[in-house]
């Protein structure tokens, strides 16, 4: 699943292509919105909210009600702008079959410039009144890439409070819960836990300074906002040195040379959901109850297994 920084870059590309233009084509290929006709509407802006994309539209006639076209990339979604896909280390930019198209928008700017945006494999395509956006994204916690993050300390405080509210919940699950804080996916979950030296299955109360964890998450997403290849190591480790543990099962830890392990962790409260894959160093991130510096084994709630190919990064998200 694309991380919050990838979604923000998608929105930036869409905003640059569509904002200020009038729609000349509107094709929403989902049952609930298939009859909607947005031709003549103008695109006011495209903004992210966590991992959600919001295309805000102005009506062609005075007195009309502004609408928002909402999409979510989920695991495989991507927007192509003028035939080009956004390249990112957590998104496949290769060609997509035509039968996976869910949204087609074409627009013309006042200066005659034209733009075309096509969404492949996106989910949750909805068209709502802009005033009702909260029905779709109101449940989300503070957005780590909110432009006002630095000026609004209440956002950080709220994210910390959300995490602390369930002290027994595994920190790896708490970080992925977009209701706590929005923007963290599986890559950042694994990398954050490694950098903070905490096992993803450790209870949140044992995860150390939650404020420092939230600060690190905000800093990493912000630093990677303009990068097509995500880096959490500082970029000083040479070829294939972008990440600490994610996708590196069976390979040596860059810090202590123990073997990175691949596991799974799921939320027993969420019926019907599959456990999510994760990566960690058993020496740098000992499991709950293990002495400091020792391999932690497989703590309750996490299943470990060797990566099938130690040379090839994993693809779980």
Image (cartoon, rainbow, N blue to C red):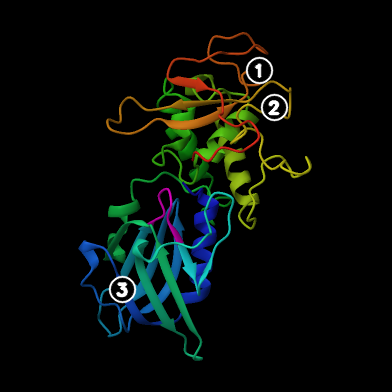
User: Does the stretch in magenta take in 74?
Assistant: yes
- Mark 1: few/some/many CA within 10 Å (<14, 14-19, 20+): many
Q: Earlier in the sequence, mark 2 or mark 3?
A: 3
Q: Are marks 1 and 2 in contact (CB under 8 Å)?
A: yes
The label number, if any, that marks residue 27 in the structure image: 3
Q: Position of residue 177 (x, y in %)?
A: 41, 37
24 up-or-down from 246: above or below: below
User: Is 136 located above or below residue 164 in the figure?
Assistant: below
Picture residue at 58% right of the left edge, 55% below the top? 88
Please give left or right for residue 229 compared with residue 15 in the image. Answer: right
- The local crowd at label 3, few if under 14, some if 14 to 19, many if 20 or more residues have their Cα within 10 Å, is some
Find numbered disc 2 in the image and state the secondary structure of the residue it sits on. loop
Residue at (54%, 45%) from the top-left corner? 153
Horizontal arrangement in the rendering, residue 89 relative to residue 109 (left or right): right
Say if 120 sits above or below 294 in the image: below
- The percent coordinates of residue 181 (x first, y second) are 46, 41
Q: Position of residue 66 (x, y in %)?
A: 30, 72
Per the model, the C-alpha gap separating discs 2 and 3 is 48 Å
Residue 209 falls within the magenta-colored stretch: no
- Which residue carries the number 1 mark? 283
The location of residue 178, given as percent across then percent down, is 41, 42
Q: What element does badge 3 sit on? A: strand
Towards the viewer: 217 or 306: 306
- Residue beneath disc 2: 253
Q: Main secondary structure of the magenta part?
A: loop
Q: Nearer the viewer, residue 109 or 56?
A: 109
């Amino acid at each position: 699943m694309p991380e919050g920084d990838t979604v923000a870059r998608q929105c930036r590309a869409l905003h640059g292509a569509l904002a200020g233009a009038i729609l000349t084509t509107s094709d929403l290929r989902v049952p609930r919105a298939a009859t909607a006709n947005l031709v003549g509407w103008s695109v006011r802006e495209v903004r992210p909210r966590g991992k959600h994309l919001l295309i805000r539209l102005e009506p062609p006639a005075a007195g009309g009600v502004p609408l928002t076209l909402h999409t979510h990339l989920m695991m495989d979604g991507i927007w192509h702008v003028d035939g080009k896909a956004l390249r990112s280390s957590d998104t496949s930019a290769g060609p997509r079959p035509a039968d996976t198209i869910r949204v087609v928008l074409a627009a013309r700017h006042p200066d005659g410039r034209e733009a075309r945006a096509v969404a492949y494999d996106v989910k949750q395509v909805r068209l709502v009144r802009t005033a009702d956006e909260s029905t779709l994204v109101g449940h989300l916690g503070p957005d780590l890439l909110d432009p006002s993050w630095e000026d609004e300390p209440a956002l950080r405080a709220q994210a910390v409070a959300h995490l602390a509210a369930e002290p027994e919940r595994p920190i790896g699950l708490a970080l992925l819960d977009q209701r706590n804080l929005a923007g963290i996916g599986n890559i950042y979950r694994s990398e954050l836990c490694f950098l903070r030296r905490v096992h993803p299955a450790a209870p949140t109360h044992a995860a150390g300074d939650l404020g420092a964890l939230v600060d690190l998450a905000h800093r990493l997403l912000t630093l990677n906002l303009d990068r097509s290849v995500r880096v959490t190591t500082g970029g000083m480790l040479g070829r294939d040195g972008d990440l600490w543990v994610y996708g590196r099962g069976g390979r040596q830890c860059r810090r202590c040379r123990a073997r990175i392990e691949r596991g799974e962790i799921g939320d027993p409260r969420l019926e019907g959901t599959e456990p999510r894959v994760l990566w960690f160093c058993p020496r740098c991130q000992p499991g709950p109850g293990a002495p400091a510096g020792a391999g932690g084994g497989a703590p309750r709630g996490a299943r470990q297994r060797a990566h099938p190919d130690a040379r090839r990064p994993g693809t779980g998200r």
